[in-house]
Image: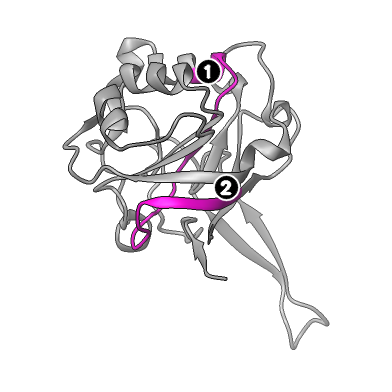
Amino acid sequence: MRVHDISAPLRADLPVWPGEQGMRRDVVAEQPEDPATVSKLSFGAHTGTHVDAPVHFLAGAGGIEAYAPEVFVGPCHVVDLRAVAERIRADDLEAAGVPPGAERILARTRNSGWSTTETAFREVYVAYDLSAAQWSLSRGVRLLGIDYLSIEAFDAEGQGHPVHRALLGSGVAILEGLDLAGVAAGVYDLVALPLLVPGSDGAPARAILVER
């Protein structure tokens, strides 16, 4: 069995969304002076590899606990979209050959590699557009993932965040901050459980792909 770790390592200089608190680790006690080494970790809910909860963009909607755990465990299609320059559109997903009934889709784009090589946030990255979100909804997708810190373009705030709202409003889990460098297109078993923080707008996750 071969396992691919597709999580971003939570290092202190990992890129974060502007205004988001990055990873910080403070050593509270340390051997040999103390009997055990103990650390305190602090970071934003959308740091590194993470899941967006409905309440992140929909006031009054559910927190991270709104998702059933099985959404994050099961067959997953990785699609190679490295040829896409900036926006993943419906026809890109259609051309990727995802079969009907696929419930989990992760896009490997030219973003991948960011989590181990970069320290500064980039405003230009490959993201989904609304047509891709609508295509996913029409196909019954339950989880949609991207290999950077947002599934939507950086300038989406001025447009009302239509991709997030369309997906979250339909109960689709958004998995962001992946790094799929070295992962070939194909079908895997995904495990990407977010931390259970009731009411939270999001939560970090450890994501792996298991080869079949």
Residue 120 visible in this rendered orientation of the protein: yes
- The residue segment tinted magenta is 167-191
Circle 2 — which element?
loop
Q: Of circles 2 and 1, which is in front?
A: 1
Left or right of residue 116: residue 42: right
Residue 161 visible in this rendered orientation of the protein: no
- Residue 183 is situated, as x and y percent measured from the top left of the image, at 38, 59
- Residue 159 is situated, as x and y percent measured from the top left of the image, at 32, 11
Tell me which numbered mark, 2 or 1, is placed earlier along the sequence.
Answer: 2
Circle 1 — which element?
loop
Q: Is residue 187 above or below residue 124?
A: below
The residue that appears at 71% across and 78% down in the rendered structure is 30
- 143 or 211, nearer to the observer: 211
Real-space Cα separation, disc 2 to disc 1, in angstroms: 20 Å
- Residue 131 is situated, as x and y percent measured from the top left of the image, at 32, 17
Please state which amino acid type lies under the numbered disc 2. Phe
Query: Circle 2: is it few (<14), some (14-19), or many (20+) Cα within 10 Å?
Result: some
- 102 or 35, nearer to the observer: 102
Left or right of residue 61: residue 103: left
Q: Is residue 4 above or below residue 111?
A: below
Choose top left, top right, bottom left or bottom right for residue 115.
bottom left
Q: Residue 43 — which label?
A: 2
For residue 61: magenta?
A: no
Please state which amino acid type lies under the numbered disc 1. Phe
Q: Which residue is mark 1?
A: 57
Farthest residue to the bottom: give it.
32
